[in-house]
Amino acid sequence: MKILSRVGVFVVRKYTGSASNPGAELLMFSHADEPGAPLRIPGGEIQSREEPYAAALRKLHQRAGIEFLPLIRALGVFETRSALDPNALSRSYCYLFDGAGLPDRWSHVVAAEHRDKNCHGADAPDYDGYKSLRLSYRWRTIGADSLGGADVNLRGDHHYFLNADAIPELFETELQ
């Protein structure tokens, strides 16, 4: 069976918006040219012979313009049948990074040569006619009451790690 390897990049930072509501935020993006598009985390395909951690760093750079962030820990690997290819297994490697010091909001353009070939399906070589993607980044507080919101769409198996067991930092009321 063919294996499609992907990486998911979870970036967290201490929530600084309210002293009465301490906790953490998750870095998410939306497609700037698609109003109402769901929020997602950075990630994508792992290249042939590329180590998953190296792919995570590459995706942070390509998708968000971030050169380097400290790794908190590897979250794990999750496998399921691929939604893109019924004859393939999708294997997702996910990592948690420390996003302290990143801005509250920014936009980043993903050059056409850095887009994954299956970014929007095999039959969509261009993103709505654009050669590049314009992504808008912002922080979102995540808690038990906000999971599964209609505005959050974690691609592939990345949702498997969005819980208090895998990332307790997002669900604690106060960070250490």
Image (tube, rainbow, N blue to C red):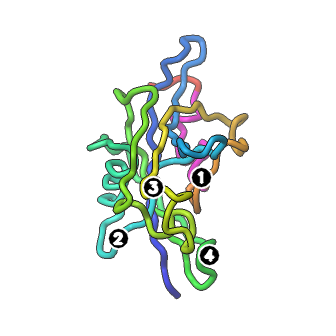
Q: Is residue 131 magenta?
A: no
Q: Nearer the viewer, residue 169 or 37?
A: 37
Query: Residue 27, image x and y in percent?
Result: 48, 38
Which callout, 3 or 4, points at the residue further toward the start of the chain?
3
Which callout, 4 or 1, points at the residue further toward the start of the chain?
4
From the viewer's perspective, tell me whether residue 75 is left or right of residue 98.
right
The mark found on residue 81 in the picture is 4
Which callout, 4 or 2, points at the residue further toward the start of the chain?
2
Q: Give SS at disc 4.
A: strand
- Nearer mark to the viewer, of 3 and 4: 3
Which callout, 2 or 1, points at the residue further toward the start of the chain?
2
- Nearer mark to the viewer, of 4 and 2: 2
Amino acid type indicated by mark 4? Arg
Q: Going by the picture, which residue comes out furthest to the bottom? A: 1
Determine contact: label 3, label 1, CB under 8 Å.
no
Q: Give SS at disc 3.
A: strand
Q: CA distance from mark 4 to mark 2?
A: 19 Å
Amino acid type indicated by mark 2? Gln
Residue located beneath label 3 in the image: 43
Q: Give SS at disc 1.
A: loop
Q: CA distance from mark 3 to mark 2?
A: 12 Å
Q: CA distance from mark 2 to mark 1?
A: 20 Å
- Residue under the point 42% across and 52% down: 95
Crowd around label 3: few <14 · some 14–19 · many ≥20 (10 Å): many
The mark found on residue 154 in the picture is 1
Amino acid type indicated by mark 1? Leu
Q: Is residue 169 magenta?
A: yes
Specify the principal SS of the magenta part.
loop
Q: CA distance from mark 4 to mark 1?
A: 16 Å
Residue located beneath label 2 in the image: 47
Q: Give SS at disc 2.
A: loop
Query: Residue 69, image x and y in percent?
Result: 31, 41
